[in-house]
Image: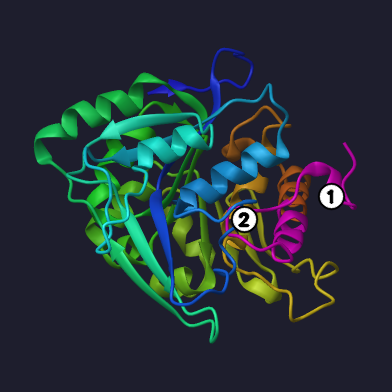
Amino acid sequence: MQKNSLNNPENILAKVGLSINVELFLKLDNGNPLEKIVMEHEPKATIGGTSYNVYSALKKLSDNSMEYKLIALTGSNPVKDEFNIQTESLRSLLKHFQVSFLDIPILNKSNFTVINVDTVTGKRTVCMNKGDIDDSKKEEAVEKIRSQPGLFQIATGVKEGEAFLIEEGLFHQCEGYNSLNPSMQLIKDKNMFYPLLKKTNLLIMNMSEFNACQLTSPESLHQYGPSAIIVTDGEHGGIFSHERFPISRFDANTKHTNDKHCIYPTGAGDWFHGAFIFWCLRFKKPFTELNYSEFIEAVKFAGEVAGKKITMPGSSNGPNLAELTEFKF
């Protein structure tokens, strides 16, 4: 396993995967779809998923010289809904939005979600359609993920059936820079979750995900591998623990949320995650070597970003640096 370096300009700054899918919005009347539509025109389809949100945060906070790569598990067939409306495949949408991505064709079809929106009542009906992994393509997929090493390796929304792609692929090459946000599904599968923690350096979860671990304190997770653990808890802030310094609580940043009717929490945790990684790029060191002041600085910045993000509709929509008043660059 190689040591990573932030001083190599040829490296991708971060690779993010694997939670990416097509989101198809279907209106039930002549109103406008809510919250997740953040484009100027009304599309039939857009991109969703926690990894896409983290990637969006990194791109929005960075300048054009900073390169990130999204890892997309794809299928070979375009998506059609039951009304025979032709929608873009995941590959086509990623290209349309000019996303730099690593195409991993391991599914029988690309993941997509159909969201029926009643724009009178606001009620949504969500139908998730997941592609199945083709076992014959596993080895090729792992090798392709390894082929373009990044500096930080970020895995979000990881399910138990995808854990091997993270453990053997994304987290295989580098020490100190691996960040994991597991799905509830993965956490409940202890035989998959705990082996993956051995290669995890930063573990980020919300309070519900931490409670699913059935532990009394985040500190208990250090013994399984992670050097740093962050548990977010919405308006209550959260907890962070690092093996090099004592466990601490942090407050939520609420200065942007005076109007309680304009709160869009979907994606806030992903923007916190992306912002934390972005700030860590400044230190040129792995998570394992961060000191207390550097860690708390990154947490405060991530909280500022998440606090601003929840005032902005759309899970992949959030602030740029100019919109952050507390931090000067």
42 or 223: nearer the eye? 42
Of the numbered discs in the image, which one, if any, rests on residue 183? none
The local secondary structure at tag 2 comes to loop
Residue at 80% across / 43% down in the picture?
321
SS for tag 1? Answer: helix
Q: Which residue is mark 1?
A: 323
* Image position of 194 with respect to 231: above or below: above
Q: Which secondary structure dominates the residues rendered in magenta?
A: loop
Amino acid at dot 1: Glu
Q: Is residue 323 left or right of residue 173?
A: right
The local crowd at label 1, few if under 14, some if 14 to 19, many if 20 or more residues have their Cα within 10 Å, is few
**10 Å crowding of disc 2: few (<14), some (14-19), many (20+):** some
Answer with left or right where residue 241 lies relative to residue 202: right
Q: Is residue 41 visible?
A: yes
Residue 16: x and y in percent read 47, 39
Query: Sequence-wise, which precedes: disc 2 or disc 1?
Result: 2
Name the outermost residue toward the left. Answer: 136
Residue visible at 27% across and 62% down in the picture: 190
In front: 208, or 31?
A: 31
Region in magenta: 302-329
Q: CA distance from mark 2 to mark 1?
A: 17 Å
Quarter in which the N terminus is drawn? top left
Q: How many marks?
A: 2
The three-letter code of the residue at mark 2 reads Val
Quadrant where the C terminus lies?
Answer: top right
Mark 2 lies on residue: 38
Residue 313: % across, % down: 66, 63
Residue furthest front in the image: 30
Residue at 31%, 40% (x, y): give it.
73
Residue 224 visible in the displayed image: no
- Magenta-span inclusion, residue 72: no
Left or right, residue 235 beside residue 198: right
